[in-house]
Image (cartoon, rainbow, N blue to C red):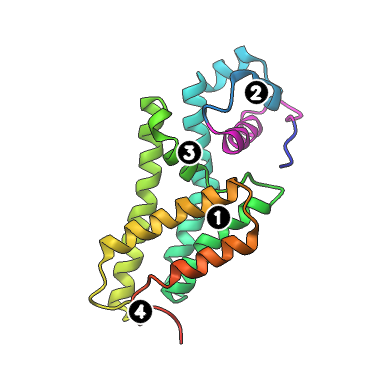
Amino acid sequence: MARGRPRTNDPDKVLEVVMKTFWENGYEGTSLADLVAASGMAKPGLYANFGDKESLYIKALDRYAAKISNPMLERFSQPDQPLSEALSGFLKTIALNAVSDETAPGCMIALSISDLSRLPEAVQASALVHNAARTLAFQDRFTRAKHANDLDLDASIEDLVLFFSAQALAVSALARAGQDPETIQRVIALSLNALPKGATPH
């Protein structure tokens, strides 16, 4: 992934590089020395502007949500496409991040959830808040799909939320592991078969 040192100590530019460093390497895989080297800001400056490593990660996760995750959820929530297309687009966007020069593989929130038990409590709480936003978006989208006759009335929204939340984690994990895009697309296509009859386009 392309990542260079910011040319200035502008906090916004530094936080962007910090986000990408954590996104690529995870919380445990990133040291303060890594953040200093990537950001071009000395350790005292990092502490003064952003706090300790936990605070840096939380700010980086908030930035990821605002810049990457929330726009994905907003697009997923739009009523201008069938549910199956919305789900497919959401999962494919996660997969496409794996091959983009501008992003790290997979989803930073999914990475945080997969590493949850090894994260400090404050970081865990932040990751869970952002993951809950995705869960709520899924619940709302499935509920509206039922009302629009785009989803079988007997379908369990709880089960679908659980399943597709797991699929988002799985796609992210496959992307981070370097799985080829064609295989990931097959996984996504297969996952859409879990949608109850009537939710897939004819």
Gap in Å between the C-alphas at discs 2 and 4? 48 Å
Read off the residue under disc 1: 94
Q: Is residue 16 magenta?
A: yes
Instruction: Give the magenta-colored segment's residue range.
Output: 5-26
Q: Earlier in the sequence, mark 3 or mark 1?
A: 3
Q: Earlier in the sequence, mark 3 or mark 4?
A: 3
Frontmost of labels 2 and 3 is 2
Q: Crowding at label 1, few (<14), some or many (≥20) Cα neighbours within 10 Å?
A: many
Residue under the image location 47 percent in, 24 percent down: 54
Mark 4: secondary structure = loop
Name the residue nearer the viewer: 7 or 140: 140
Read off the residue under disc 4: 150
Q: Is residue 108 above or below residue 147?
A: above
Q: Which mark is residue 34?
A: 2
> Residue 33 at x, y = what percent?
64, 18
Q: Amino acid at mark 3?
A: Asp
Q: Crowding at label 4, few (<14), some or many (≥20) Cα neighbours within 10 Å?
A: many
Q: Is residue 78 above or below residue 74?
A: below
Gap in Å between the C-alphas at discs 1 and 2? 25 Å
Q: Earlier in the sequence, mark 2 or mark 3?
A: 2
Read off the residue under disc 3: 62
Q: Amino acid at mark 4?
A: Asp
Frontmost of labels 3 and 1 is 1
Frontmost of labels 3 and 4 is 4
The answer to whether marks 1 and 2 mark residues whose Cβ atoms lie closer than 8 Å is no
